[in-house]
Image: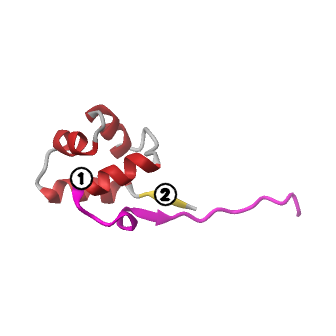
């Protein structure tokens, strides 16, 4: 399973020199939604993620990380 790396996205925005509001507008989303996403309090939908990557002019795969999941089988 893959998950958005919120810290990496926040760092990318900071290093871009753009304010979060500008990135949100370029991505076509509300600033408060971006803020919630960056703080891990709101999930970033696939379309939003692609729009954010386009706004930051980066490849989509850069800001995701693989998360290990374990299947619970009920076996002891």
Residue 21: image location, x then y, percent:
19, 39
Q: Which residues are magenta?
A: 56-76
Q: Is residue 64 magenta?
A: yes
On screen, residue 4 versus residue 18, left or right, reads right
Residue 54: image location, x then y, percent:
28, 56
Q: Nearer the viewer, mark 2 or mark 1?
A: 1
Quarter assignment of residue 60: bottom left
Q: Please name the predominant secondary structure of the magenta segment in the image.
A: loop
Q: Tell me the crowding category of disc 1: few under 14, some 14 to 19, or many 20 or more residues within 10 angstroms, Cα based.
A: some
Which disc number belongs to residue 9?
none
Residue ID at (23%, 56%): 56
Residue 32: image location, x then y, percent:
30, 32
Which disc number belongs to residue 3?
2
Quarter assignment of residue 5: bottom left
Residue ID at (30%, 37%): 29
Residue 72: image location, x then y, percent:
78, 58
Residue receiving disc 1: 55
């Amino acid at each position: 399973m893959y998950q958005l790396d919120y810290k990496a996205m926040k760092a990318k925005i900071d290093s871009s020199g753009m304010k979060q509001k500008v990135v949100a507008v370029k991505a076509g989303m509300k600033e408060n939604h971006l803020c919630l996403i960056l703080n891990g309090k709101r999930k970033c939908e696939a379309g939003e993620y692609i729009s954010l990557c386009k706004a930051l002019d980066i490849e989509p795969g850069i800001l995701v990380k693989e998360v290990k999941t374990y299947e619970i089988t009920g076996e002891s």
